[in-house]
Amino acid sequence: MIGSSPALRQLFDQIRRVAPTDATVLITSEHGTGKELVARAIYQSSRRKATSFIKVNCAAIPAELLESELFGHRKGAFTGAVSDR
């Protein structure tokens, strides 16, 4: 990412601050604004950069399944949960 506007400088500062931590980060913005670029910048500056980067399009997951998709579930927790995940 390249830029020097005040908004981008603030974003770069936030990336630098959060990348070395184990904090959970939720990146929200309008479609096509570079959320994945921000996620990859955090990832590349983190201790986890040697592991796989997994991209999740939360908008494509039905609201009632989002929690299960992100955090897993136990067998029998809901209809269709046939195994721990």
Image (cartoon, grey):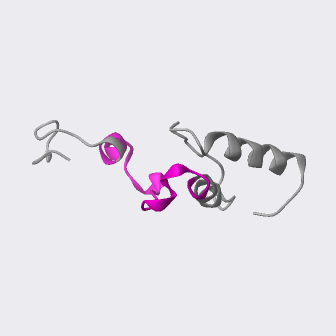
Left or right, 78 with respect to 72, comes to left
Left or right, 19 with respect to 57, comes to right
On-image quarter of the N terminus: bottom right
Instruction: Judge by depth and name the residue closer to the eye, 31 or 68.
Output: 68
At 62% from the left edge and 55% from the top edge, which residue is drawn?
A: 35
Q: Where is residue 74? Give x, y as percent.
A: 16, 38
Q: Residue furthest right?
A: 5
Quadrant of the image occupied by residue 20? top right
At 48% from the left edge and 53% from the top edge, which residue is drawn?
A: 48
Is residue 40 inside the magenta stretch? Answer: no
Left or right, 42 with respect to 1, comes to left
At 62% from the left edge and 54% from the top edge, which residue is drawn?
A: 45
Q: Where is residue 75? Give x, y as percent.
A: 11, 41
At 56% from the left edge and 55% from the top edge, which residue is drawn?
A: 43
Q: Where is residue 23? Give x, y as percent.
A: 53, 36
Q: Decide if residue 82 is in sight here.
A: yes
Is residue 46 inside the magenta stretch? Answer: yes
Q: Where is residue 25? Give x, y as percent.
A: 55, 41
**For the magenta stretch, what is the residue range?**
43-69
Left or right, 5 with respect to 57, comes to right
Instruction: Judge by depth and name the residue closer to the eye, 55 or 30.
Output: 55
Instruction: Judge by depth and name the residue closer to the eye, 33 or 7.
Output: 7
Q: Is residue 85 above or below residue 4?
A: above
Q: Decide if residue 53 is in sight here.
A: no
Instruction: Judge by depth and name the residue closer to the eye, 25 or 23.
Output: 23
